[in-house]
Amino acid sequence: MRRRVPSPLEAFFRLETSSGIVLLAATLVALAWANLSPGYERVWQQPLTVGAGPFALTKPLILWINDFLMAIFFLVVGLELKREMVSGELRSIRQAMVPAGAALGGMVVPALVFLALVSDPLEARGWAVPMATDIAFALGCLRALGRRVPLPLLVFLTGVAVVDDIGAILVIAVFYTAELSFSALAIAGALAVALFALNRAGVRRPVLYALIGLPLWLAVLKSGVHATLAGVIVGLAVPADGRGDTPPAVRLEHALHPWVAFGIVPLFALANAGVTVDATAVRALAERLPLGIAFGLFVGKQFGVLAGTWVVVRTGAAELPRGLGWAHIYGAALLAGIGFTMALFVASLAFGIESPLYAQAKVAILAGSVLSALAGVTVLAGASPRPEPVRNG
C-alpha cells in the first residue's frame, strides 16, 4: 500500500507532520512568553512601515503577519486545493463524496453547537471559529501512532481538511468582510482576470503570477475583503497541467510549502497563541463564548464529521476507503477538532486582535484542540485496521 502512494503525497505527509512539531514548539514558546514577560503584546503591536512616500503602508507587526504572510499561507492552500482537484481526493465527484460529506458535517454542526450556547450578537460573530481543522497538528497526532494508523486514514483526514479550507475561505470572503471599496474591488477583479488569462494563454512561469499577485493583494486589502484571499486566487490561477514536465503549481507548492510550514505558520502561532493562563483565564472558560468554541471544536466536530461520513456511506453515494472502519473515522473526527491555526485566524477576524473576546477565544481554542487531540489519539491507539477481504483466485 505504501509503495503505491505517489511520492508527492508522502512528502506532503512528512512535511506536515514535522511542521506540527515546530508549530507545537512555537505555541509553547508563545504561552511561556505571554505568561512570563509583560512585553509580549508590545512586541507584536510595534508599527512597521513598508515602502516609501505615497506607496508606504504602515501596520502593526502582528497585522503584517496575519494579513501579508498568511496570504502566502493561503496561496499554498490554493495550490493544494488545485492539486487535490486535478490529481487528488477531489478529482472525481464520487471520490470526493466521503471527505466532502465529513467536512460539511464538520463545519455545520460545530457552528450550530456554538450558536446554541452563544446568544450575544457581538460574541456570536465567532460562530465560524470552531469550524476549522489544523492539518499539521492533526497529521502530527496520526504520525505519532506509527504503523497502527492505516495510510488511507491520512489521505481521508487530509481530504477533510482540504474541503474544510474551502469552507473557511468562503466564510471569510462572505461573512468577515469589512465595508467594501468598490473601486479597489474592481481593480482586484481585473487583476484576478489577468491571472486566469495568463493561465489560459499557457504562461507557466510562476514569477509572472507573483508579479500580478502582489498588487492583487494590495487591492484586496484596500477593498475591505480580507487580503489573504488574494493568495487563494493566485494559487488557483497557477497552471496544474503537466505537459511533459512537473506542473508549475506543483513546483511552486513544493518551493513554498517548507517556508510556510516551518516559518510562516509557527510565526503566526508565536504572535497569536500567547495568552495569559491564570485563574481568571480558567474561570473564563465557563463563559458562553469560550464554552461555545471549546464545545464546538470538541463535541461539534466529532459528531459533525462522523455524521457527515455516515450519511454519505448510508445513502450509497460512496464507500468508506478500503482498510478503514468506523473506529478510524471516529478517531479522525476527534482529531478534526484540533482547530488551532485557522481557528485563531478566524477569531482574529471575528473579534479583532485587541479585543478581550479574542483573548477568551484563544484560551477556548487551546482547550478544545488539546481535548480533541488527546481523545483522538486514545481512540486510534485502540483501533485496528479492518482486514482486507479475501479474494478467490
Image (cartoon, rainbow, N blue to C red):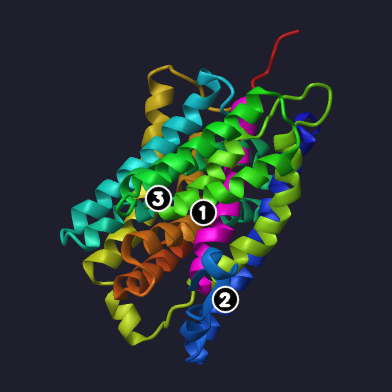
Query: What's the residue type where badge 2 is placed?
Result: Leu
Q: CA distance from mark 2 to mark 1?
A: 33 Å
Q: Secondary structure at mark 2?
A: helix
Mark 2 vs 3: CB contact within 8 A = no
Which residue is rendered at x = 53% and y = 51% of the image?
217
Query: What's the residue type where badge 3 is placed?
Result: Ser
Q: CA distance from mark 2 to mark 3?
A: 36 Å
Q: Position of residue 114 (x, y in %)?
A: 26, 54
Give yes or no for residue 163 being in the magenta stretch: no
Q: Does residue 21 appear left or right of residue 330 in this picture? A: right
Image position of 202 with respect to 278: above or below = above
The magenta-colored residue range is 60-88
Residue that sits furthest to the right in the current view: 244
Q: Which mark is residue 268?
A: none
For residue 242, what is the image quadrant? top right
Disc 2 crowd, CA 10 A, few/some/many (<14, 14-19, 20+): some
Query: What's the residue type where badge 1 is placed?
Result: Leu
Q: Quadrant of the N terminus?
A: top right
Q: Which mark is residue 28?
A: 2
- Identify which residue, 8 or 121, lies in the foreground: 121
Q: Which mark is residue 218?
A: 1
Which residue is rendered at x = 54% and y = 85% of the image?
33
Give yes or no for residue 85 being in the magenta stretch: yes
Disc 3 crowd, CA 10 A, few/some/many (<14, 14-19, 20+): many
Image position of 129 with respect to 278: above or below = above
**First reached walking from the N terminus: tag 2 or tag 1:** 2
Q: Position of residue 119 (x, y in %)?
A: 16, 58
Q: Secondary structure at mark 3?
A: helix
